[in-house]
Amino acid sequence: MTKPCPKESLIETACRSGVWDEAACTHLATCADCQELVLVAKEMLRFGTAPPVPQPNLPSAAFLWHRAYTLNQEEILHRTRRWMRWFYLAAGSVFGVGFGGWTWLHWGLVKADFVSGSQSVLAATASNGGKAGILLFWLTVLLFGFNLLWTWQEWRGLKTGLRAYPRTKD
Amino acid sequence: MDESEFSRFHHQTARPLWAYLHRLTSDPALADDLLQEAYLRLLRSRVTAPDEIHLKAYLYRIATNLVHDHWNRQKQKTGYVAEARQMAPETLVDPTQDFAMAQAFQKLTLQERSLLWLAYVEGHLHREISQVLHLKEGSIRVLLFRARRKLAQLLQLEEVTVPKEKP
Ligand SMILES: [Zn+2]
């Protein structure tokens, strides 16, 4: 036969419960497919319940519980750090635009020093009393620098892969 | 689920789950790793199951997915699926056990192994098997039938003794 026997569930139930009623016994005596089912089920149960030669290295429930807790905490931290990175990037961009805007607005003063001497835009703004401009510049550098450092650290973390953690036995 | 509930659940399921993973993968070390990962995923998913039977089905579902993911990664790496990997005989079975059965089991596909194990070792109903293996409940009967037939042919099972006990 290429299709399962329609009375298969009767035999499966008997196999599972171990209770063989007359209907199941009578059917089994005449059905080759169900006989095969009984044999395979018996073999599988014997195979499945035999003790394995290599002993399992089972982690304890306490270890798993605490490991899951730690991983959850790490995930929360990772999510927070990701949001903070976006925040730093956005803040850095705002300060950068602020610094550029300030320089553009005070270009007359900045240009005078910049063109005449060897001073940089930064020094020029400073010499023109642009404390706000300097502050904006350094905030931009700081925030972008911090972000770069963070990205590099995470990239390094990815390269080294997942950390292995020790297993404890029951 | 609190820690004590998990501890009880772990105590009941860890060894059978390891045996399932071991027979699916034929690799004790891999079974160790996948078991640990399955429990961690179960705990981290914070799933709320109505009872331990559902929770167990969910755990087996995670474990089965992990095995599939593992083989898929292997396939991407090596270009073939080493489902029926050949292990040294001593790592397969106890010397007192039937070596033929272990060898025949290795020749089945992952799905066939899962089906037979869940049905006849774990004693799951077709509905539960369908949940674990992401299959339609209606297709389990036919798939199980084919898997049984294949294993029976591999084992060359022929004889059966009709049970005499009656209720
Ligand atoms: Zn039948």
Image: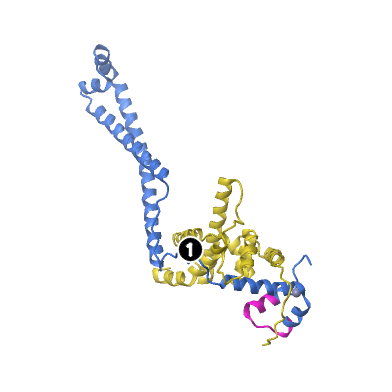
Chain colours: A blue, B yellow
Quarter-of-image position of residue A47? bottom right
The amino acid type of the residue labelled 1 equals Val
In the image, is residue A11 above or below residue B116?
below
Considering every residue shown, the one lying at the far top of the view is A116
The prevailing secondary structure element of the residues shown in magenta is helix
Closer-to-camera residue (B84/B167): B84
Farthest residue to the bottom: give it.
Answer: B167
Residue at 33 percent across and 25 percent down: it is A100
Q: From where the camera sits, is residue A21 visible?
A: yes
Secondary structure state at the residue bearing disc 1: loop
Residue A18, magenta (yes or no): yes
- Give the residues drawn in magenta, as a range: A11-23
The answer to if A145 sits in the magenta stretch is no
**Residue B123 appears in the figure:** no
Given residues A107 and B5, the one toward you in this image is: B5
Q: Bin the neighbour count of mark 1 within 10 Å (Cα to Cα): few under 14, some 14-19, many 20 and up.
A: few
Q: Is residue B99 above or below residue B166?
A: above
- The residue carrying mark 1 is B47
Above-or-below relation of A29 to A110: below
